[in-house]
Amino acid sequence: MKRGFFLLLIAVVVFTACQNSSKKAETKSAEKEAVVNIWTAEQAKAWGEEHGWLRGCNFNPSTAINQLETWQAESFDPETIDRELGWAEGIGMNCMRVYLHHVAWEVDKEGFKERMGKYLDIADSHGIKTIFVFFDDCWNATYQAGTQPDPKPGVHNSGWVRDPGDLLYEDSTLVATLEAYVKDVMTTFKDDQRIAIWDLYNEPGNSGYGNRSMPLLKKVYEWGWEVRPSQPLSTGVWNLSLSDLNKFQVENSDIITYHNYEGPDKHQAAIDTLKTIGRPMVCTEYMARRNNSLFTNIMPILKKENIGAINWGLVDGKSNTKYAWDEPIPDGAEPALWFHEIFRKDGTPYKQEEVDLIKSLTLE
């Protein structure tokens, strides 16, 4: 989903800082707040034992170009969702990561939550748990409710939209709306066992925002702590250079999530560093064939390490993520090598050997 090569090797200093946060130098009130806000290591371990090895995809139905088209009443597509999650079930997937958007909630609050419930009903019927994502710093900075644009031929995620994007810096009242949105949705589903994780903010700092994303990142954790759902709160670390954001994320997440689109050596190095934190781990984005991040060389590592394996993409569709981030094909021709996705629109696999490998790991 992202542009360029994404490196992920969080320096050991991050772990050290995380450990230092609990030392005696802290005040008693700060220690009390940490206990209330963030899961203990024991709580995180219990969650990991309950859920086992999560494996699945970042999912939006093939008929939706972005989060708004997924969730707005006029384009919500339960038939396609049911069909495509059935294909996922058939290869042993048990978890999908699904993006929300505050505008779809703002336009129709109760209807939005009803559609979330319908999605959860469908996913649960296929034995699939859900990771819901609130905010996102990737792709188009502006958006609007209503009819969404048609895909640009051959362009990866041409219609995907950030949330809240540039509007956060233009509308001083937006934060109050975002707070109401997060708290309403999370409170409604705070004890729903069909939800595996609340992923509070996808790739904070992307699109050149850097530390400008820190205030919202901190706020969404605060809002989540006020609700304190039964499910874990997390945000995936994804870029080595964003040290301030990375430090905050790993110190404040109930479980550790991360993104890595590199080959096996660099991916393993990232795992070796992050697992020293001592909490369950889920890789919430991987698998970009051009980058040598493949089912064949990464998914077996993730299973061996008992790390959740959530690749980008299930079915080729309007998101155009079979095309690479930075290699558009303006005439919309078939790329020589698909970047993401497992299935074609008719449900046949892009690569049968990949599906066979996935099934060998998930259905054994």
Image: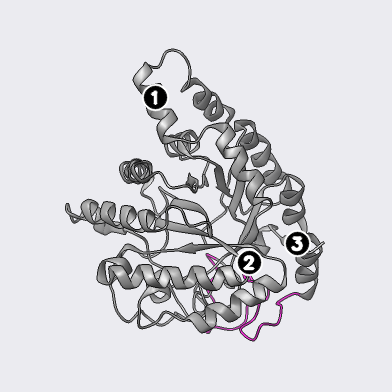
Q: Position of residue 77 (x, y in %)?
A: 46, 81
Horizontal side of residue 143 vs 99, given as left or right: left
Residue at 51% x, 44% y: name it: 237
> What's the amino acid at mark 2?
Gly
Kindly tell me whether residue 202 is visible in this rendering: no
Determine the CA span between mark 3 and mark 2: 13 Å
Packing grade of label 3 (10 A; few <14, some 14-19, many >=20) is: some
Residue at 61% x, 84% y: name it: 345
Dominant SS of magenta comes to loop
Horizontal side of residue 353 vs 201, given as left or right: right
Horizontal side of residue 140 vs 196, given as left or right: left
Is label 1 in contact with label 3 (beta carbons under 8 Å)? no
Magenta residues (range): 325-351
Task: Write down the residue under mark 1.
Answer: 32
Packing grade of label 2 (10 A; few <14, some 14-19, many >=20) is: some
Lower position in the chain sequence, tag 3 or tag 2: 2
Q: Element type at marker 2?
A: loop
Q: Any magenta on residue 334? A: yes
Q: Position of residue 317 (x, y in %)?
A: 54, 79
For residue 362, the mark is 3
Packing grade of label 1 (10 A; few <14, some 14-19, many >=20) is: few
Task: Write down the residue under mark 2.
Answer: 127
Residue at 44% x, 69% y: name it: 117
The quadrant of the picture occupied by the C terminus is bottom right
> What's the amino acid at mark 1?
Lys
Q: Any magenta on residue 245? A: no
> What's the amino acid at mark 3?
Thr
Horizontal side of residue 241 vs 168, given as left or right: right
